[in-house]
Amino acid sequence: MRLPGPRSGGGAVPRHTVVFFHAHPDDEVLLTGGTIARLAAEGHRVLIVTATDGEAGLTDREAARELGPVRHRELGRAADLLGCREVVRLGYPDSGMDEAAPRPGAFSRVPVEPVAARLAQLLVDARADVLCGYDAAGGYGHPDHRQVHRVARRAAEIAGVAVLLEATIDRRFLRAALVAARPFLPHDPQYRSQRLRAAFAAPGEITHTVSVGRYAAAKRLAMHAHASQAVGGDQERLLAWLLRLPPPAFRAVLGHEWFVQVGRRPSRVRSRALLDGVPPLQGPAVPGGDHPPIGG
């Protein structure tokens, strides 16, 4: 998919190009939506790349037959609400959660090297300064999320991207947030299961805690755009639970986003902006219309 180039950040201040690589539509907003909105508002060029269309995601029975195209359209709307004008789909089949019975050609089973080569070429074409993938756990362990981690690592190496970041959640914060949000959650959601003990990243591994409270409204609107993922089968899903939170609670739970910078030693003082530590650009910013078109 190709969308028009980004808005110009102005000619006087150099701007970075940041590529967010995600497994499925809606991952971009849940894990990095506030950061995307913040970077776009600051005038940086932001691209969202999805490995799959999320066609194996849970939804109501009526929507299931055409879920891939539905989710792809939802992603376009969500990206627009976040200020991102460039979305690229790689188009691999969604693996689903059942690793014992993956779909034919499933993304999680595709060899890393050819996928990484595709992503690396996109990074080179976009002149990317930063690539964002996923943590080593693949967040909560979805096979496609773990594959994103592997592919992003290799693609950054091939393309020579200066900075590789991995989106995650502070595991300790997640547990506390789930306890605080308990009145709004079903009695036994899967997100309080045993697997959370090893999900995402431990506090000592995280290098960036990005404040995105100012962009909570944009993040919430973008979450609403992924309407197909509010219900799975006969049950509400995480998206619906989060959208039920009152605005102050929503900002408290979703007002920060976390990243691990590969090759950077964590310290007690975390970076508060995604581009902290990214080498400054030299010369004027490239106007949005002068960027080469990027396609999947």
Image (spheres, rainbow, N blue to C red):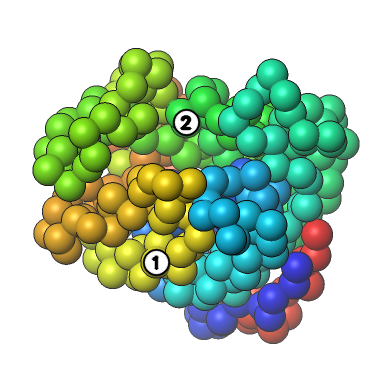
- Residue 126 appears in the picture as rendered: yes
Q: Nearer the viewer, mark 1 or mark 2?
A: 1
Disc 2, SS: loop
Residues marked 1 and 2 touching at CB (< 8 Å):
no
Identify the residue under disc 2. 139
Q: Is residue 223 above or below residue 266?
A: below
Q: Please state the horizontal and vertical placement of residue 111, each as a whole percent of the image.
A: 84, 28
Rendering coords of residue 9 (x, y %): 51, 78
When the figure is inspected, residue 122 is found, relative to residue 140, above or below; the finding is: below
Q: Which mark is residue 100?
A: none
Q: In the rendered view, does 67 fall on the left or right side of 79?
A: right
Q: Residues within 10 Å of mark 1 (few under 14, many from 20)?
A: some
The correct choice, above or below, for 36 with respect to 263 in the image is below
Horizontal arrangement in the rendering, residue 223 relative to residue 228 (left or right): left
Residue hosting label 1: 224
- Hey, what amino acid is under mark 2? Gly
| Residue at screen point 31% across, 33% down | 189
Which of the two discs, 1 and 2, labels the residue nearer the N terminus? 2
Secondary structure state at the residue bearing disc 1:
helix
Q: Quadrant of the N terminus?
A: bottom right
**Which amino acid does the dot numbered 1 rest on?**
His
Q: Residue furthest right?
A: 114
